[in-house]
Amino acid sequence: MTEKIALTPKTHTTPPAKFSHGVRKGNILQVAGQVGFLPAEEGMPPTPAGPTLREQTLQTLDNVKAILEEGGAGWDDVMMIRVYLTDVDHFAEMNGIYNTYFEEQGLTRPPAARTTVYVGLPAGLLIEIDALAVLG
Amino acid sequence: MTEKIALTPKTHTTPPAKFSHGVRKGNILQVAGQVGFLPAEEGMPPTPAGPTLREQTLQTLDNVKAILEEGGAGWDDVMMIRVYLTDVDHFAEMNGIYNTYFEEQGLTRPPAARTTVYVGLPAGLLIEIDALAVLG
Amino acid sequence: MTEKIALTPKTHTTPPAKFSHGVRKGNILQVAGQVGFLPAEEGMPPTPAGPTLREQTLQTLDNVKAILEEGGAGWDDVMMIRVYLTDVDHFAEMNGIYNTYFEEQGLTRPPAARTTVYVGLPAGLLIEIDALAVLG
């Protein structure tokens, strides 16, 4: 039987419900929906990196990456990225931030597929991202 | 060639289109989006378990579980749960129901990752859930 | 190490950001969110197949299929189809188009699981679809 491992970076706040920030089983790694919360501080409630799309997008990507790395993976292993925005008018700006971010990551393999849709999110949050990776 | 198997629990109404409630191929099992419909009754249209978030959430989780079990899996095999709510104000209540439900399932492995977003659903439905499992 | 391959059909416009229309790694193939854009023409901006749900749904399904085929797969390999509509009132019409389309594809295996939710999309677009396939 292949072990199923919870991925819980030290930087992450406790999930608000009985779910894992990420799980890995064999070569499949799933990252839960991440938002732009700053690294957790003992006794403090989860706090977004800032009110802007840029701050939240970059923090969210960092949070996804931390879970990938906790599972021994990286962006090059990611097959699918799901981006949830709250506002269609944020698409172009998010793409710009996204492109620059990934150019700086020095990927050596093709970028992941992606779906972007526009949904509701809790107040103050502008973006949520999850990811599916296949290792090896 | 690995067989692709449709998972159709007896409790389930016929899908409203040409899709499967669940499919399994090798060690990958995908559950289609489930809502809070009661077990199917011959000649009756699909009927939600009730108007409340609690009734619909518990029925939806039961419906997901029935498909997992039809495919020889259980909650412990689930990597990702996607929760679609219609109202951001339902988040805390859904989490409470979700936590209690999973505590009662007696999981022996880490819980699945999860993404929750807020979307539109057909009238009368408050929640939809799908799941990806990796067996073995 | 298993190769990760970008799937880029000739018919497709360049993605508006650093993502792949599809990726395959081993037996896992992920198709990015597709919309109803007509086959790309040099120097022309992406253009929807038409303003109607029918035109866009059929073109979107063609676009998903082109990526599957680029990766050596077909509809029979698809485990999960995610349908994003902008209007709950489009559900019945989309299902009719979807059913007829898949009847004409001559599937030899059970159809994929599916989740349909209602979200926001860029102006003029009525439907977006992505897909996960497992080959072999």
Image (cartoon, coloured by chain):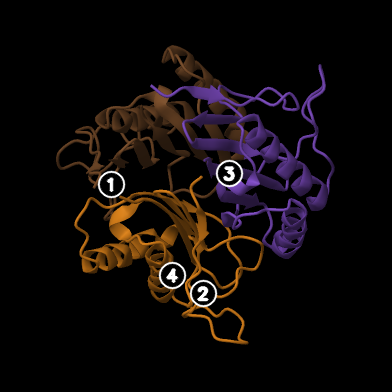
Chain colours: A brown, B orange, C purple
The residue wearing badge 2 is: B12
Q: Which mark sits nearer the N-terminus, 2 or 4?
A: 2
The residue wearing badge 4 is: B63
> Cα distance, mark 2 to mark 4?
8 Å
Q: Nearer the viewer, mark 1 or mark 2?
A: 2
* Residue B107 against residue A79 in the figure, above or below: below
Q: Amino acid at mark 4?
A: Asn
Helix, strand or loop status at disc 3: strand
Looking at this view, is B105 or C28 the one in front? C28
Q: Are marks 3 and 4 on the same chain?
A: no
> Dividing the picture into quarters, in which one does residue A132 lie?
top left
Q: Are marks 3 and 2 on the same chain?
A: no
Q: Amino acid at mark 2?
A: His
Q: CB atoms at circles 1 and 4 under 8 Å apart?
A: no
> Cα distance, mark 1 to mark 4?
22 Å
What residue is rendered at 48% in x and 78% in y? Answer: B51
What residue is rendered at 43% in x and 43% in y? Answer: A124
Q: Let me know if residue A49 appears in the view.
A: no
Q: Chain of mark 2?
A: B
Q: CB atoms at circles 2 and 4 under 8 Å apart?
A: yes
Which of the numbered marks, if any, corresponds to residue A20? 1
Residue C23 in the image: x percent, y percent?
A: 54, 29
Q: CB atoms at circles 1 and 2 under 8 Å apart?
A: no
> Cα distance, mark 3 to mark 2?
23 Å
What residue is rendered at 60% in x and 55% in y? Answer: C109
* Residue A52 against residue B120 in the figure, above or below: above
Q: Chain of mark 4?
A: B
